[in-house]
Structures are given as structure tokens and as C-alpha cells.
Image (cartoon, coloured by chain):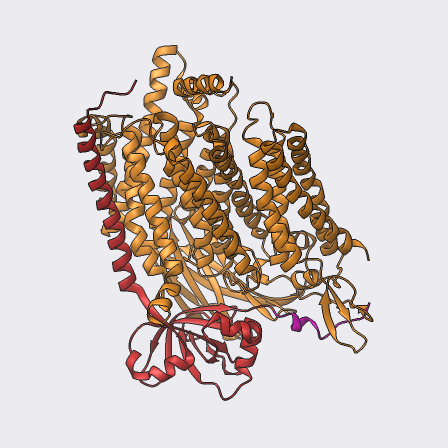
Chain colours: A red, B orange
Amino acid sequence: MEEAITPQVQSAGRIKFIIGGLLIVAAIAYLIFTSTQASAQYFLTVEELVARGDSVAGRDVRVSGAVLGDTIQYDSKNFLLTFTIAHVAGDNKEIETEGGLAKALYEAVNDPSRPRLQVVYEDVKPDLLRHEAQAIMTGKLGDDGIFYAEELLLKCPTKYEEAVPGQAEG
Amino acid sequence: MVYAELGFGSLIITFLVSLYAAGAAIYGVRRNAHAWVDSARNAMLLTFPLLSLSALTIIYLLVTNHYEVEYVTEVTSRSMPMYLKVTALWGGQAGSLVFWSWLMSAFATAVTLRKWDRDREFLPWVVVVSSITLAFFLGLVIFLENPFVRIWQTGTGQIITAMFQPAGSRIFVPADGSGLNPLLRHPGMIIHPPMLYLGFVSFVIPYSFAMAALITGRTDDRWIRITRRWTLVAWLFLSLGLILGGRWAYDVLGWGGYWGWDPVEIAAFMPWLAGTAFLHSVMIQEKRGMLKHWNMILIILTYDLVIFGTFLTRSGVLSSVHAFAQSAIGPAFFAFIGLTFITSLTLLLQRWNELKSEAQMTSLLSREALFLLNNLLFIGILVVCFWGVLFPLISELATGQKVTVGPPFYERATGPLFAGLLLLMGVAPLSAWRHSTAKTLGRAMWKPFIASLVVVAAVLIGGIRHPAALLGFWLAAFVAFVTLYEFWRGALARHRRLQESLPAALWNLAARNRRRYGGYVIHLGVVLMAIGVIGIEIFQTETQGTIPQGGQMALGNYSISYDSLANFDTPDGRNVARAVLSVYKNDQYIGELHPRRDYYYESQQPMTIPGVRSTWEEDFYVLLVDWEPISSQGATFKIYHNPLVNWLWLGGFVFILGTMVAAWPEREAEAETERARVRRARYAAAEA
């Protein structure tokens, strides 16, 4: 059934395939490498961003923090959203020791000693933007110390505590 | 209240029964004791009714507002409609794990009901693998994420949660639950998560058979033939889950997008990529007896990516697009993934020599070589995804600094690979097994190729100059023509040979060779989806602005005028602001749109719902951004023009249709290839 293959032909065929395969693997590695270089961004906490200041000014970075509800202002005519975020630990383990993300966010907004960062974002105000939400943003830190966000993602962990008020005994 | 105890008790029994099933099957096979194997089988059959009891208990608690159960409080509220209360079964983490296990037991039961005499050597091991998987998920539910935990008030007035009544405490019933996140309150909630989960779960079955093949040493392609339809069904559900997720995002998330390279989306996409590579490469093993190691690796990878995907997507607190809370179940998942991965690879290494290729690849343009290339590209995309998800961790370990990559990374790195796959989709169906040359391929290809150039010329004349769009349209046209040409050639041959009418010939052609022509229909679906993606990714335009009542705003050849706005409360606890817009195209009135903003009182959560006018040509998509309380002051809108986006959904439909054709049971007995028949005889002889 199979064609008779002499050892020489076999190894020649193999080399052909190995070279072809290596070329493709190299191409994929190249794509991953250059794309990583082109779009990698530092993921910083508010504290780190404030501490670095000028060294990251003008560079695309990611930063996350807890939204302070009172500071949210939206000028819908100009699609100009401003708010302030408070420092939240970047490490998952630290967040766990604080009692989970919801607790960590709660602590962050109620601790005036934490570093804070003012944010400006020009687009539609996201539905999920609210007090104690976690904002994850991509953008640049301006010379004025304000963070100009180009992308804004929000996480709102549901908290069991929220359900406690307004309970009835059964 | 005994329901919680009932449901929880049933979970524990199922957990013990599935452990027993695994143990009894192993013991029975090792001792050659049929009674034990049969007992394992019966145990496996018992898991489904038991888990049905647990799952139905949760649903009962959900729909009857038993808020003393913590899970019910977390995911439902009184104002939610009935259908959403039922779907809240998979609205939270604990419930979705029960749901997963329930589906798993249903599939395992279906497999167990197969005729045992046919694949007697495999089935005990299939029971072992699937019941261990089931036991793992049940263990998570019982020990870490119990949906039946209740709320208690202690003597000192403290509110605590526990499964069983702590001493001196009373049951505590909150007046209302906190409710499902408004983003999840969409009919998509009924169908998207279950489809994804069905896809995840059903991939466990082919994996179980693969492991059974490795353990028993029956390493021919029998396991692949048995699980072929399972794999297709798993793939069907997974694909459907992904497509529906995209549609849901497009409808609900308010940014006019369907895919955001969110880590959770990627987590569901990765098993799909590995599974798709597997679906293609098993064909080479069936036809040519090659790539046996590779297929094993692919199915192991798919299985562990399914577990990983479940870990990341288990709905939990889906507050952002896909937020997920950290919890104790993370380490358990990683331990299980590590354990199964290492065990599977060990089994594979033990059989490595038995899985030698039966043939050698000789021609770079042969069908099998092109399939191999297709596999490399799929795995390439998988590696890109994996790298993107893990990069923050890697960078933190290497430099102490967290560095992330976003959607631009994925788009840039996968774009050429997707284009390569499209091109292959056009070339591979025309290449021959074993041996193809550029000459034979060229002869088969020139007609569709010329036709595709005509399309590109037409697009150019139409005024499109964007190079990526031109390349994309060319690829789409090329694949479409090759595929249609294949249908045409096949039908014409039947028509000439058997004197069938052309439609009948076409129908019979596909019906007689469902796998091949179903596959072609899937390819056509991909082409349509590609057209939609090109349209929205490259040609999407947007504008925004505030206009007074009666005022106008334009985008392209569309314009809207803002007629009125109504603000009212609804019985289900929402405040709705709904704008009425008149839409004009080329200054012709074409209809009304009603973009709105719902505000959910109980969760204090607004939700923007777009007004969309959909045609084959484009979607005109309007968001209500803001409005003045006195409506004469005006309102602010954001408008998107999404050309060709509906081809994406049409393509999704065709894609699913093609998968169903390919997976449809054959009426006649499973056609065996010559190779398979020879091998079967050899095994029968060896056993005798």
C-alpha cells in the first residue's frame, strides 16, 4: 500500500519538513516577540505610578485603583469624565490577606493616607463606574500629574455585606 | 427547611458514588472481575439522577425565594423574572460548578449506556477517567464552594454562614437577595453559558477514550472513530457558546464590539483552538496512520484547557465584562490540572513506541502536510493566547515588574496566523493525499483563483483601497469559490454518472459524505464571519454629540433626529430613560430607534441598551449617553456605523449548520476504511 521509501529519500524528506516546521515556528516566535515589544505595558499600582512620576510620563502604562464615588464628574456634552482613584495593592496575595477584592477596595476608598490619582477619560461614561469599583486603565501620566486614560475597564465585586441592611427575620 | 440538606446530601452521595465507580472499575479490570466492572457502570449511571436531584433542589430554592440560602441571596432577588431565577443556577460560582457536574454526569451516563460488548476494553477506563473528573468537581462544590450554605444568626446577634446549624443560632432570612448582575439579565444568559459548558464537558469524553486507549494499549484509531461524533458535538457546543457570547457582548455591553481579548474570553477560546487542531489532525491518523503522538497530545491539551477554562469562566462575580474573584478553588484547580497533565503524559510516554507512524510524509504540498501546517497555525494562535495570559506572571517573575499585553498584542500576533489559516482553507481541499505538486494544485485551483481576482477588482472599483481589507476580501472570495467549486464538481460528477438532477445530486453528495461536505459548509461559515470581521474592524465609524429636542446629527449617509425622551419606572425595579429617534438614510425617513438607559434600583447599576437598525449591509447602532432631566434641554448620543457586521452572525449560523451536518449520525453502519478493517481483524486475532 505505502510507496517504497529508500532511507535516503526518507531523510531528505525529513529535512525538508524539519526546515519547513522550524521556519513556521520561527515566524510564530517572531510574531509573538515583536507584538509583545510593541504592546507591552507596565502594570502599576497608584503608589508605583506616583513614585515613578517623570520616568513613565508620556509612556503607555496600565494602572489600577479603587474609584472614589464622590469624585466622579461627567461632562456629557464634551464626553469628559474625571474621577480619582485610590491605591489598591497590585499583588493578589496582598489582596487576599486584606480579605478579598471587595474588602480591599473598601479599605482603599476609606483610607485617606493612601496615594491617590486623578484620572481623565474622554468617552462614554461606563455603566459600571461607581464608588468602590476597581478601575483598570491604560493611558499616559501627564506632566500635570493627571492620568489620561485611553481605555477604562471596571470590576465590581459583589459584596455579601451589601445585602445585610434591610433584612427581615424569618 | 430540609431542601438544603437534601441537595447537599445528594451531592455527597454522588461524590462517594463517583469515587466508588472509579475504584470498582479499576479493581474489576485488574482482577478481571466482570461483576465489579458492571457495578462501576451502575454507579456511573446513578450519578445523573443523584445530581439531577441536587441541581433541581437549587433551582427550587432559587425560584421560591429561599433567601436563607447564601447562594440564592447572592444571585437572585424578588423582582427577577422566573426564567432568570432558573438561569441563576449558573449565575454564580457555586451553582455553575454544580451545573458543570450535572452536565458531566449526563454525558458520562450517555457513554455508559453504549453497547458494552463492542468496546469492552475501553469502557471501564472511560468510567474511571470521567468519574474522577466528576469527583474532582463535586469535591470542589462540597468542600470549597457549597451552594447550600445558609445564613444564621447567633445568640449574640452575629450573622454567620454555615452549612449546618451552629449551636445556639437561628436561621436568618434576608428580606431580599442582592440579585443577578444587570449585565447578566439578558436572554443570552439562558443560552450562552450552558452552551459553553456543554462544549467544555463533552470534550471530557474523547479525552477519556484517549486515556482508555493508552491504558489498554489499544492504540489504533478505534478511540478516534468512537469519539468522532462526541468531538464534533463538543466542538459544536463550544463554537456556539463562543458565537453567542460575541452576540451577547454586541447587544449588551454597549461598545459595539463582539470580542475584546479579555482573559476569560481567551480561556474559552484556547480549548476551542486545541480542539479544532485535533478535529483536523485525527483525519490524518484515520487516513494515513500518522500523527498518533500529536493527536494524543492535542486531546490532553484540550482536556486540561477545558479545566483551565472552567476555572477562569465559572461565572462567579461577572461584574465587569468578566471579573472573577480569587478564591480557595484556584490552587485546587491548578493541582488537578497539573496532576492530570502529568499522568496523561506519563501514559503517553509509556506507549510512545506503539504509536509509531505507519507512513512517512513525503510531499510538502500533500493533504497531510497541509493539515499539519494547519495544526501548527492553530497551535501558534494558542501559544499567542497562552503567552498573552501568562505574560504578566512571567514578567513579574523575571523582572519583578508586572507587564501586561492588551488587545493590540493579540490582534497583531494572530492576524497573520488567521490569514494563513484562511489561505490553507482554500488550498488544502484541493490537494491530494500522499502526493501533490505545485502543478497539480495549480491545475485544480486556477478557476477559483481567477474568480477571486475578479472580486478583488470589483472591490477596488467600489472604492476600497485599504490593503488589509483587500487581502481579506481576496482570501474570503478565494476560499468561498474553492469550496463552492468543490460542491459543484462533486454534484456534476453525480449528475453525469447517476443521472440525478443537480439539486438531488448536491443533496445526496452532502448526505453521503457528511463529514467532508459538512466541513466545507463550516469553511463557508468562516468565510462569512471573516467578511463581517473585516467590515467592523476596518470600516467601523463613529460619532458623538449632544443635540436638542428636534435637533439632528449625522454619520456618513445616516442622520438621526431626536424626537422625545420618556422616563418611567418599571414593575421589576428599573428606572428607564428611553429616547425616540427618527432615522434617515440619504435623507429618506427609514424608521425609529429607541436607545435607552435602564437604572436598576436595588443594585444601583445603570445599563445602557443600544438602539440598533440592522441590515445585511450594516448596523446603525445608537447609544443614549446622557440627557437633561427637562427633556427640552437635549440629550447626548454616541453613534456607531458597523458595516457588514451581520455577516458575522450569518457566518456563525452557517458554521453551526455545517457542524451539525458533519456530526449527523449516518444511517448506514459506520463506513470503515480498508485500513481500519485490516487492523480490527488483527486485533481480533491477537485477542483470540
Residue A96 is drawn in which quadrant? bottom right
Q: Which span of residues is magenta-colored?
A: A159-170
Can you give x and y, in whole percent of width and height, for residue B50 in the image?
A: 71, 43
Quadrant of the rendering where the C terminus of chain A is positioned: bottom right
The answer to whether residue B634 is visible is no
Residue most toward the bottom?
A113
Can you give x and y, in whole percent of width and height, for residue B418 in the image?
A: 32, 46
B444 or A3, which lies in front? A3
B61 to B485, vertically: above or below: below
Q: Does B357 lie within the magenta span?
A: no
Magenta span: predominant SS is loop
Counting every numbered tag in the picture gives 0
Residue B161 is drawn in which quadrant? bottom right
B209 to B574, vertically: above or below: above
Query: In this rendering, would B459 be left or right of B213?
Result: left
Can you give x and y, in whole percent of width and height, for residue A76 in the image?
A: 45, 75
Q: Does A167 lie within the magenta span?
A: yes
B308 to B300, vertically: above or below: below
Please name the residue shown 81% across and 70% down the image.
B169
B504 to A150, vertically: above or below: above
Please name the residue shown 53% across and 60% down the image.
B330
Can you give x and y, in whole percent of width and height, for residue B31 in the image?
A: 61, 31
Query: In this rendering, would B426 be left or right of B241?
Result: left
B291 or A144, which lies in front? B291
The answer to whether residue B647 is visible is yes
Please name the residue shown 36% across and 57% down the image.
B387
Quadrant of the rendering where the N terminus of chain A is positioned: top left
Residue most toward the front?
B31
